[in-house]
Image (spheres, rainbow, N blue to C red):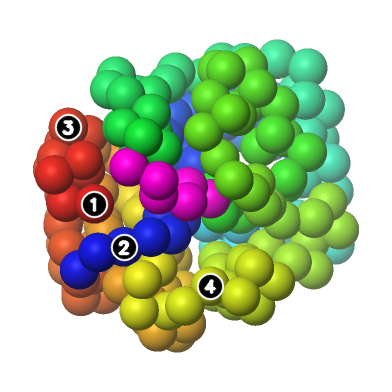
Amino acid sequence: MNYINILFDLDGTLTDPYKGITNSIKYSLEKFDIIENDNEKLKSFIGPPLEKSFMEHYNFDKNTAQKAIRYYREYFSEKGIYENILYEGIENVLKELNNKNKNCILATSKPETFALKIVQYFQIEKYFKHIIGSNMEGTFIEKEDIIKYILKKYQLRNEVTIMVGDRKYDIIGSHKNRIDCVGVLYGYGTREELQNEKPTYLCNRVNELLQLL
C-alpha cells in the first residue's frame, strides 16, 4: 500500500521511556507506602493508560488510581520526562518519511502537554504534521478514541492511513477504526501480545520501518 498518513505511538515506538516511567511509578507508590523493586512488573505500565495499570496491578480503586497519577506526574513533569532515550535510527526514519511527503502524526495516550515537551526535547517536533495526545483529566486516553479523533479532525482516508505502535492497544485501536497497523517488536509489547491482535505487519527493528512504510 502507498500510505500517506503515518500515525506514531510515542513510548516504546519512538522513544525508550523505561527509566523515567519506572522512577515516576516508584515515586508514586512510595506515597502509599508501597516499595516496588520488581522493575519487570513496572514495564507493563509503558503503553496503556496509567489509571488502568494502577487499578490492575495494585488493586487501586478509581479515586486512588487518580491520586496515584497526580503523584506520578509530580516526578514525571520535573525529572521523568527527560529520563528518556530516542531509539537509534528513529530520527532518520521520520526525516526520510518527510522527504517522501508522508504526513507523520503523533498519536499517543500520554498527555499531550508531556508528549509535546518530549518531541521538543529530542528536536523531532519538526517532523510531525500534528501532535495529538490525551488530556490531563483522563477522559480522552484510549488509543481507539485518539485515532478516531485524528481521522475525523483531519479528514484522513482510512485506506491510506496506518498506525505504528508497540503494544496491543495500538493494534486494537487501529482495527476498531479500520486502518492498517504495524506492531514494532523493539518496544515493550511481546511478539505473542502483538500477534494475538493480528496486526497488518510486524516489524523487528527500527530500520525496517522505512522499507515497510
Tell me if residue 104 is in the magenta stretch: yes
- Number of residues whose C-alpha sits closer than 10 Å to that of mark 3, classed few (under 14), some (14–19) or many (20 or more): some
For image coordinates 41% across by 38% down, the residue present is 98
Residue 117 lies left or right of residue 11; in this view the side is right
For image coordinates 44% across by 18% down, the residue present is 85
| Amino acid bearing label 3 | Asn
Residue 5 lies left or right of residue 207; in this view the side is right
Q: Earlier in the sequence, mark 3 or mark 2?
A: 2
The segment highlighted magenta reads 100-105
Which residue is more in the foreground, 74 or 172? 172
Q: Earlier in the sequence, mark 4 or mark 1?
A: 4
Name the disc covering residue 207, or none. Answer: 3
| Amino acid bearing label 1 | Leu
The residue under label 4 is 156
Tag nearer the camera, 3 or 2: 2
Which x, y percent locates residue 96?
31, 32
The residue under label 1 is 213
Structural distance between the alpha carbons of marks 2 and 4: 11 Å
